[in-house]
Each structure stands twice: as C-alpha cells, then as structure tokens.
Image: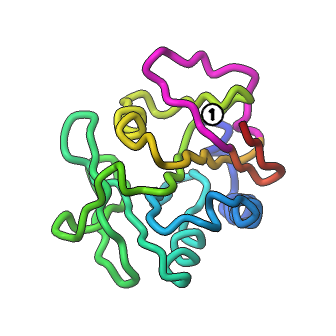
Amino acid sequence: MLKNRNSMAPREITALSDKVFFNLQSVEAYKNAHHLLLYHSFHSETRTEKIIADCIRRGRNVYLPVLLGKNRFTAVKYEEGCVLKENRFGIPEPETDNEQASPDMLDLIIVPGVAFDDAFHRAGYGSGYYDRYLKKAARAAKIGICYDFQLVRNVHAGPHDIEMDIIVTDKRVLRR
C-alpha cells in the first residue's frame, strides 16, 4: 500500500486531498468540533494543510501530535504562524511549550493510516502511537482520512486496534 501511495505524483496527491477535504466538510462531527487533533501530513499522506487552515479560520482549537517517547505522543496546540520542527520521523510538529490538550477534552481526532477497511479498522505504521492515544480519547469522534484506493477488504486488526467512527476518502464518506 505504501509503495502505491508513494508512487503518486504531487499533483495527484493535491487533487485527491482536496476531494477528501471537500467530503470531510459534509461530516457533522467535523462541522461541530471545537477541539480537534489533526496530523500534519508528510510524504504522500492525505494532505491536511487546508483542513488545519479551515479550522483555524473558523476559530477552532487545533492540536497536532508531538512525540514524547517510545510509542507515545501528546496533543499540542497549533496556531497560525506556529513554528514547526521535524521529529525523528520527519513529521512536522509544534514546539512542546505550547498549550496541550488532554485526550478527554477533544471533540474530534482526524487519523492518518496506511489502509482502512469497511469494518472501520485501521492499519497504521505499526508503532501503536494512535491506538494508545485513541484509547484515552473515548469522547472524541474518530475520523480516518485516506485516498479511496487505501480502503481494503480487511486490515487484520488486532485486539488493541481502535476502530474509526467515520472514514472519509476522495470518493465517499463511510459512517458506522
């Protein structure tokens, strides 16, 4: 899946990501959220820059993951003009001295993934960062975003994997 995603041209990534953003805007959980954890996209992931900018423009509180150590992250506030630095994986994250959100204060978490299935399971990069955090954020709606070709029949979820509530692609919105 990563090989297919990484073979996409930058123009295709942008075009499909714009369609994901368009479809996301129809989701009530997105429209009504005030405290959102997003991710800052890197490499060939579904782009999130327009989603982040839209949330900030609407006066919502945006948080991005900041790695803390082995398989853990915290949600750190991101504001327009905030300095981003790359973590050890090359993912941009805000300075850690910004305000942090506890998992229980978040309304919505937008989650990246390598693949998703129609049973709302997610295959990540294998470290468990998101599954550990999502377990603590029981109140938040969980939306996986991806390109439509990343939807597969089965991602072989384990007992520790947290299911999504909604999956948004460039072609559709799947709701539980």
Q: Is residue 18 left or right of residue 38?
A: right
The quarter of the picture where the C terminus appears is: top right
User: Residue 36, percent across and down?
Assistant: 46, 61
Instruction: Find out whether residue 155 is within the magenta segment.
Output: yes
Badge count? 1
Q: Main secondary structure of the magenta part?
A: loop
Which residue in the protein does label 1 denote? Answer: 115
Quick one: which residue is furthest to the right in this view?
171
User: Residue 101, percent across and down?
Assistant: 30, 59
Residue 22 appears in the rendering? yes
> Quick one: 15 or 73, which is closer to the camera?
73
For image coordinates 57% across by 36% down, the residue present is: 114
Residue 131, above or below 104 = above
Q: Is residue 143 left or right of residue 124?
A: right
- Where residue 167 sits, quadrant-wise, is top right
Q: Which residues are magenta?
A: 149-166
Residue 139, above or below 3 = below
Q: Secondary structure at mark 1?
A: strand
The quarter of the picture where the N terminus appears is: top right
For image coordinates 70% across by 26% down, the residue present is: 119
- Where residue 94 sits, quadrant-wise, is bottom left
Mark 1 Cα within 10 Å, few/some/many (few <14, many 20+)? many
Instruction: Find out whether residue 158 is within the magenta segment.
Output: yes
For image coordinates 50% across by 33% down, the residue present is: 124
User: Residue 89, percent across and down?
Assistant: 33, 47
- Where residue 50 sits, quadrant-wise, is bottom right
Residue 19 appears in the rendering? no
> Quick one: 6 or 79, which is closer to the camera?
79
Residue type, label 1: Ala
Residue 16, above or below 119 = below
For image coordinates 22% across by 68% down, the residue present is: 95
